[in-house]
Image: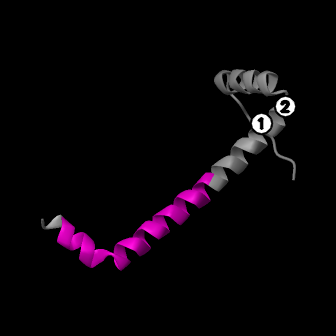
Amino acid sequence: MAMTLRTDETLDAALAELSQREGRSRQEIIRLAVLERAERGRSDLAVAESVERMRGEWREVLDRLGSV
C-alpha cells in the first residue's frame, strides 16, 4: 500500500543522516523503525502480563516480605 509521509526539517535531516550512515533508503529506515517499535510494544506487553501473573502466583510471599 502506498503512503505519503510528510516530514519536517528535523525528521528529514535525521532520515538523511541515518540513510547515509547505514547505506539504506529512507523508506527502509522508516520501515525498520516502525517494525522495531511494534516488536518492542509486543515485548513490553508480554513482560507486563508475566509480571501480573507472577504477582498473583507469589502474592502471599510478596505480602510477607513486605511486612518484614
> In the image, is 9 to the left or to the right of 59?
right
In the structure shown, which secondary structural element does the residue marked by tag 1 occupy?
A: helix
In the structure shown, which secondary structural element does the residue marked by tag 2 occupy?
A: loop
Residue marked by disc 1: 29
* Residue 42 highlighted magenta (yes or no): yes
> In the image, is 27 to the left or to the right of 63?
right
For the residue carrying disc 2, how many other residues have a C-alpha within 10 Å: few (<14), some (14-19), or many (20+)? few
Q: Measured from the top left, where is residue 17 in percent x and y? A: 74, 21
Q: Nearer the viewer, residue 23 or 3?
A: 23
Q: Which residue is rendered at x = 69% and y = 24% of the image? A: 14
Q: Which residue is rendered at x = 64% and y = 23% of the image? A: 10
Q: Nearer the viewer, residue 50 or 40?
A: 50
Q: Measured from the top left, where is residue 64 in percent x and y? A: 18, 72
* Residue 46 highlighted magenta (yes or no): yes
Using the image, tell me which numbered label, if any, was put on residue 18: none
> In the image, is 48 to the left or to the right of 18?
left
Most distant residue in the left direction: 68
Residue marked by disc 2: 24
Residue type (three-letter) at the residue carrying disc 1: Ile
Contact between marks 1 and 2 (CB within 8 A): the answer is: yes
Mark with earlier residue (1, 2): 2
Predominant SS along the magenta part: helix
Q: Is residue 57 above or below residue 1?
A: below
- Quadrant of the rendered structure where residue 51 is? bottom left
- Quadrant of the rendered structure where residue 59 is? bottom left
Tell me the magenta residue range.
Answer: 40-65
Q: Which residue is rendered at x = 77% and y = 22% of the image? A: 21
Q: Measured from the top left, where is residue 15 in percent x and y? A: 74, 27
Residue type (three-letter) at the residue carrying disc 2: Arg
Q: How far apart are the two marked residues, 1 and 2, measured between alpha carbons?
A: 7 Å
